[in-house]
Image (cartoon, helix red, strand yellow):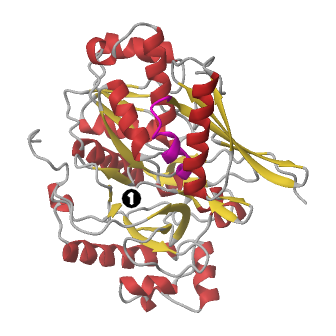
Amino acid sequence: MNWNCEYFNPEIETLDRAGIKKLQLERLHNTLEHCMQSEFYRNRFAEAGIKPSDIKNLEDLRKIPFTTKQDLRDTYPFGLRSIPLEDCVRLHSSSGTTGNPTVILHSKRDLEQWANAVARCLWMVGCRPDDVFQNSSGYGMFTGGLGFQYGAELLGMLTVPAAAGNTLRQIKFFTDFGTTVLHAIPSYAARIYEVMCEQGIDPRRDTKLRTLVIGAEPHSEDTRRRIEEMLGVKAYNSFGMSEMCGPGVAFECKEQNGMHIWEDYYIVEIVNPDTLEPVPDGEVGELVLTTINREAMPLLRYRTRDLTRILPGECPCGRHHLRLDRMKGRSDDMIILKGVNIFPIQIEQVLMQFKELASDYLITLETRDNNDTMRVEVEMKNVNLDDYAALQALEKAIRSRLKDEILITPEIRLVPKNSLPKSEGKAVRVKDLRKQY
């Protein structure tokens, strides 16, 4: 492969819109016929009074009922498969802490296509076979580990499957193995930097890190830029979910102006999460995805619950695949307080505007005297916590900015650095302790 080529799969990545839609329709028709091997979809189509042949064009996709996470739970473990179980070679699942987990099956071909999509993403941001790729994601049932592992190997990089946690070891690997590319969730990337500082390690001077892949947690543009400044890297936003395989669904290019979603794998819809009607391009809504390149367990019109929008216009990188904005949060993670709809990402965007604040924060919702309240605890950088007047002024400024953004006046608590609980997985940003009546 030509290392100077901007594209991992030039034929697919440079398709124009007409070519993309033509390929999508062909693959959709094949997928619909294939889905009839699934008892779930046979019954779902019969209940809706439709047949695969009724879907004449991409717009007809709306005739098909949505598939939801509850459908996966109700048919646990293998009720949505479209091939015999003996032809499946791997499964991934969610934790299932609130009922049955969601299980996704993969054939050998599915895994090959998944690895190809991830390799395409990594190549797009400049990763090449002479890079050293370190993966700080958990392996096992979590898709971020094996998903990036196989994609990085297919691209030809030396891979370091460090897995989650053990930050001192992660940093030792950076320096000993010459890691140039790191995959980490945003909160953990910030934690790595803090430990580096504690150890007297300068990421610019003492490591070869230059590229960071971040995802799995909603995060603001200010958070991304802060992490880039900390580690001296370019940080690229990634989107994936286990129901769609895992990482490799959508990824930023070097322009960092939205994530290209691979439309040879997925058909994209953005719907109003309340009415379930489509919204215009550029308007935020719930992301709905249909897989059109999967064998073991294709999903039709899957409600991801993730909130985003399609970015209008063309990308200067030359790819015509639709671009998704960074995830705004999840429709089922929305906080409703005093009748106001609030997403945690709105609070983060405000906090990250204050240079005095570190990256970690915690939103706690409580009921006091039958009144629901919000408390925002946020860590300070290395500043004088004994300067009472300065802290009061900072708290007042944060409270005012937040009120302007979320229309609620929260309680603000400024706490010392590293005093909030840390997690090796996704950061816990919200605790809802309200009484349920």
Rendering coords of residue 356 (x, y %) = 49, 29
Rendering coords of residue 13 (x, y %) = 20, 59
Mark 1 surroundings within 10 Å by alpha-carbon count, few (fewer than 14), some (14 through 19), many (20 or more): many
Residue at image point 37% right, 70% down: 282
Rendering coords of residue 210 (x, y %) = 26, 28
Q: Is residue 318 above or below residue 384?
A: below
What is the secondary structure assignment of the residue under circle 1? loop
Residue at image point 31% right, 50% down: 252
Q: Is residue 34 above or below residue 96?
A: below
Q: Is residue 421 left or right of residue 37?
A: right
Q: Is residue 78 visible?
A: no
Q: Is residue 242 above or below residue 57?
A: above
Residue stretch rendered in magenta on the structure: 344-356
Could you say which is closer to the camera, residue 42 or residue 333? 333
Q: Is residue 212 left or right of residue 189?
A: left
Q: Is residue 419 visible?
A: yes
Quarter of the N terminus within the rendering: top left
Which residue is labeled 1 in the image? 325
Q: Quadrant of residue 140?
A: top right
Rendering coords of residue 274 (x, y %) = 61, 76
Could you say which is closer to the camera, residue 50 or residue 393? 393
